[in-house]
Amino acid sequence: MRRKDPDFRLRQHARHAFDAVVRGGAETYVRRLHLPRVLPIGPGEIADESPAARRAIVRRLARALRAERNRGRAGHWTYDLNRHIALAQAYAAERRLMAAAPRGSSVGENG
């Protein structure tokens, strides 16, 4: 059983802390400010808030997040916890905005 693992509580607290930081950052996310810091992306892509563009950005964020997570698990020297958190915040915010957008909407508000 996992509860017998001596590090279980520590991992549980770390997970809750990470989730709280991601939620907080996702709530204050501003695409034009935060997205260029975590993805190589141009102003045209940032301004495009169409559903197709948002899906493409979410896919890119998911790929970058997966790569960062793999670096962390491998103990690679290039792993950056701050980048990992920023990617998770951007991913959560973009997913939330994508879910909140009306289906078939092609015009969004700039954020």
Image (cartoon, helix red, strand yellow):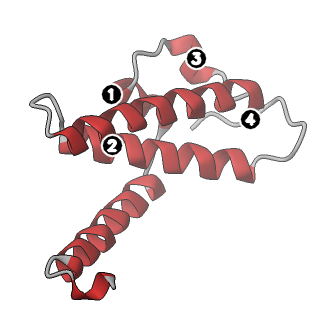
Specify the quadrant that holds the N terminus. bottom left
Quarter of the image for residue 52 reads: top right
Question: What element does badge 3 sit on?
Answer: helix
Residue corresponding to mark 3: 45
- Dot 3 alpha-carbon crowd within 10 angstroms: few under 14, some 14 to 19, many 20 or more: some
- Which residue type does callout 3 highlight? Glu
Residue corresponding to mark 2: 86
Question: What element does badge 4 sit on?
Answer: loop
**Residue at x 84% of width, y 47% of height:** 102
Label 3 or label 2, whichever comes before in sequence order: 3
Q: Front-most of 64 and 27?
A: 64
Label 1 or label 4, whichever comes before in sequence order: 1
Residue 3 screen position, x and y as percent: 28, 87
- Which residue type does callout 4 highlight? Gly
Image: 103 above or below 41: below
Residue corresponding to mark 1: 37
**Residue at x 32% of width, y 27% of height:** 37
Circle 2/circle 1 CB separation < 8 Å: yes
- Dot 4 alpha-carbon crowd within 10 angstroms: few under 14, some 14 to 19, many 20 or more: few
Distance of mark 1 from mark 4, alpha carbons? 22 Å
